[in-house]
Amino acid sequence: MGDAGNEDLPKPTGRPVFFFDIDNCLYPRSKRVQELMKELIDDYFVRHLDLPAEDAKELHSKYYTEYGLAISGLVKHHKIDPIAYNREVDDALPLDDVMTPDPQLRALLTDIDKSKVKLWLFTNAHITHANRVVRLLGVDDMFEGTTYCDYTKEPLIAKPHGEMFEKAKKEAGVTSVTDCYFVDDSHLNCRHASSRGWTVVHKIEPDDPVPISPAAKYQIRHLEELRDVFPGFFIE
């Protein structure tokens, strides 16, 4: 799997690009990665900002709501080192204990006709976390590249901000929004992608209610449903 960079961007290929979110999208929320991440972030706020636990949770929630990522608020208001944060939070997650290769996911991605569509990862995580997750799921060789939140650069750019969607298009080598397909578990991210003219699939957990206000044209409970939503993308 390639890592996109500004120095070596792919040339447009004429194929549409299917952008896949990673966390809670390539794997189910039942893996509890989000809960484990939240605990590590709260602990980071307590230790590095010298806050009581409840204040840390409140500020964490505030930054996540305002910026889409807690780290964005930390960098902006507290000048923390993003790479050190990544080492203590994302890279400290015990993913080896909760992630295993997913044969069904691999079969789904294998059955997509790569001559018709390019597969691309699109995440708010840093590249180390992205690479680690897809390696543990056994699908790291199925994608042609990754657009990620680069913790080495300021300002941090992440979904749902427009700059992040433009970054993804540029890095994946796609010029028209009509060639952008996207699946994500975030209602907010899906809503923003839809407003930009992307073809969007909102992945909703099986136990969650269907949103009163849909964020996307398509809503699915499992990635397997992509076979029915986009049959033309799959090998016959």
Image (tube, rainbow, N blue to C red):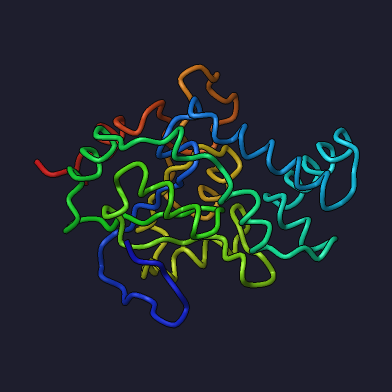
Q: Which corner quadrant of the image does residue 180 belong to?
A: bottom left
Is 173 placed above or below 135 here? Answer: below
Q: Nearer the viewer, residue 174 or 207?
A: 207
Q: Is residue 66 left or right of residue 11?
A: right
Q: Nearer the viewer, residue 52 or 62?
A: 52
Q: Residue at x 40, y 67 (%)?
A: 3
Could you tell me residue 123's position as x and y percent? Answer: 50, 53
* Image quadrant where one finds the C terminus: top left
Could you tell me residue 23's position as x and y percent? Answer: 49, 42
Is 212 placed above or below 188 here? Answer: above
Q: Residue at x 61, y 70 (%)?
A: 152
Q: Which corner quadrant of the image does residue 174 belong to?
A: bottom left
* Image quadrant where one finds the N terminus: bottom left
Q: Residue furthest left?
A: 236
Q: Is residue 101 left or right of residue 20?
A: left
Could you tell me residue 86's position as x and y percent? Answer: 62, 56
Q: Nearer the viewer, residue 41 or 208?
A: 41
Q: Is residue 30 left or right of residue 138?
A: right
Q: Residue at x 78, y 55 (%)?
A: 73
**Count of marks, rendered view:** 0
Q: Nearer the viewer, residue 108 or 141?
A: 141
Could you tell me residue 20's position as x and y percent? Answer: 40, 48
Q: Residue furthest bottom?
A: 7
